[in-house]
Image (spheres, grey):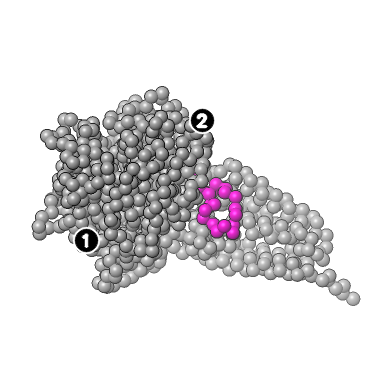
Amino acid sequence: MKTPRPHRPLSQTIGWAVLLLIALYSLLGGIWLAALGGSWYYATLGVALLASAWLLRRQRTAGLWLYALILAATLVWGLWETGPDFWALAPRYDLLFLLGLWLLLPPATHGFYSPRPAKAAMGVAMLGMLAVLGYGLFNDPQEIEGTLARAQPARAHPVPGVADEDWPAYGRTEGGVRYSPLAQINAGNVKNLRVAWTYRTGDFRTANDSGETTNEVTPIKIGDKLFLCTPHQFLDALDPATGRRLWRFDPRLKADKTFQHLTCRGVAYHDADNGVRFPASRAKAGDQAPGLCPRKVLLPTNDGRLIAVNADNGHPCGDFGKDGEIDLQQSMPHAYPGGYNPTSPPVVTASTIVIGGSVTDNFSNQEPSGVIRGYDVRTGALKWVFDTGAEDPNAMPGDQTKFVHNSPNAWAPLAYDAQTDVVYVPTGVGTPDIWGGDRGPLKERYANSILALDASTGHLIWHFQTTHHDLWDMDVPAQPSLMDVTKEDGQTVPAIYVLTKTGNVFVLDRRDGRPIVPVTEKPVPQGVARGPQTRGEHYAPTQPFSALNLAPRDKLTDKDMWGATMLDQLMCRVMFKRLNYEGIYTPPSENGTLVFPGNLGVFEWGGMSVNRDRQVALANPIGLPFVSRLIPEDPDRAIGVKGAGTENGVQPMYGTPYGVEINPFLSPLGLPCKAPAWGYVAGVDLQRNQVVWKKRIGTIRDSLPHLFPLPPLKIGVPGLGGPISTAGNVMFVAATQDDYLRAFDVSNGHLLWEARLPAGGQATPMTYAAGGRQYVVIMAGGHGSFGTRMGDYLVAYALPD
């Protein structure tokens, strides 16, 4: 007579059902992935899990032995694919590990014959997983450990016309160094920083504002005043020692939700008595006449104006433009509110204000011009133009002529060399960005370039192009940094460091634009591998690559895909294999193209910090893939609400054969499909052009609902905003998707201090001294489309009295 099996506990039935579902998912998804040319492991795993589930259902101990083998094989497979990378291994192990824990419990094996040896084997495999994860947590293969050998000299090179205690321009200098010679706060005492004061602007996003409402300002400090602008372009003057408001100027911004951007990265300052800002050999009679506003703050507004405000009292400068304003929409083709949007501060010389601006991305082929202009610093009169799409870029507009529509714009901050009176202009691509079949040679000539212009005349001295026929929005997105670099042979060269979204850092001689660090033209993908060919499009056969590059990876594979569990990691691998992707510069397609580096780029508007005294640079590169998908459309379709555009989602590109959908590459659960890290901090030796150290930065503490109180483990998250550094051997950076300001040791990248911010810190900090005390200031106001907490806080930190 057959002996009946013992009663099966309900928990055993539930556990078996869960295992069966995982097995079926792995088998079917694995077959799909293998058919696309991906790994066979998931299909093999599915078969093994089905067999184990069948044996466990029959209460056979062999099912436990098979599961122990599955755990051991997965342990080895994960290491083979990723190495000991904690965050990459976690989704490969987590579900199987949790099921293993269940199988170790007595109810799971109730009725099994002699399960202990099999459970011991499972336990050994699971301990192996824990050991590997623990090792990876403290020995990160993505990080670079090293030390920038050269020490900070006792006395830094002074910057002519810039007091050590001030931060008088967006990048501290017009050359964009983002480095301060102050050393009261240093690597030894930075851990003692405390909040000295907090200023609330009272400026919040309203229901009528753009989704891209952001607080990206870096204040400037000159003498006894600190100046900042808010998203609605209020201009505030504060006491730098207390944060008390001295005055406010309201530009009465005429904004609405159709604006693609509502932000102000900073303002510029001019002092007519400071002749050092302009070479005496180039000065002309009357260049420095004081007028009504001997000290003025230049405020760009998102509705297309440039306003001069008296720095002493906050009143408009009546002798500048019309009642203190310049209309930047004048002579613009296809002008409309928000269509031309100056979001970055201008460069100001002793005689000239040089300004660029952004235009709405991917809305239509009938947009304003990206012209760069120079205005008289005293009167606001137009002195010169450089229209990047015109046959004669310096041709002034007339009664019957306007600037060239859709010409490449210069939305990022500019840089200026006062010794040579040369302004360096980073340009983007002529919009629409993702289809370029109608761009002629003139609209491509100065796109995605760095332009060296005579600041007094606008005449071109040289230019260098960083991307040819851009179809990926790979602008030159950041203020270039000017620094005299000492090469290994002892020769000192005036250099300009040009950061790009691709991760390339082009190091050029400021005198003639010739590369100092080698640049190589390399073949790039041509045509569309999956789906129909793109109508009317052509592709650049090669692209320039610099020997100095901070992109996190050369090329992604399906091994780089990620998820919260093995299940969504498998789906990300399937999604990856279905997209067009042959590496960087894979053309956009109707099928969908993986863009990596993505639209945020490796570098954004925050730039980097360079230290001439130590010949080093500090940066916070990111790496998050996006997907662009062309949508066939009638090019003659009617244009909708003018300017109602966004940088993510569906964008119409009216007047072209396509619209486009652009989104981050996310899993079905909404997590990035690429394994972390997505954000780093890095130290670069500029004599050897080598990344000496690199560390992940940021946690997912503020990215998950409060229902998931995970410990704030360092994972490496994206950031918007740049770093600064000081003679105290400290690098300060916020930017990340978690709400922190952090300080790192410049020499080795070790985290020295971090402070919670009351809102997102998507801005570049700055530092100054007032009353003998050094302060570090950051705008914590959040970023609408980046998803961080919104606020209105300007926070200043200092050492205790």
Callout 2 secondary element: loop
The residue that appears at 55% across and 62% down in the rendered structure is 568
Residue 715 on the magenta segment: yes
Q: CA distance from mark 1 to mark 2?
A: 54 Å
What residue is shown with label 2? 188
Amino acid type at image mark 1: Ala
Q: Decide whether the magenta segment is chiefly helix, strand or loop.
A: loop
The quarter of the rendered structure image containing the N terminus is bottom right
Is residue 374 rendered to the left or right of residue 656?
Answer: left
Where is residue 591, by image quadrant? bottom left
- Which residue reaches farthest right? 1
What residue is shown with label 1? 335
Amino acid type at image mark 2: Gly
User: Dot 1: few (<14), some (14–19), or many (≥20) neighbours within 10 Å?
Assistant: some
Q: Is residue 541 visible?
A: no
Q: Relative to the observer, which residue lies in front, 207 or 69?
A: 207
Q: Position of residue 49 (x, y in %)?
A: 67, 64
Q: Position of residue 245 (x, y in %)?
A: 36, 44
**Residue 412 circle label:** none
The residue that appears at 17% across and 56% down in the rendered structure is 330
User: Dot 2: few (<14), some (14–19), or many (≥20) neighbours within 10 Å?
Assistant: few
- Which residue reaches farthest left? 399
Magenta stretch in the rendered image: 690-718
Q: Relative to the observer, which residue lies in front, 704 or 215?
A: 215
- Residue 652, placed above or below residue 276: below
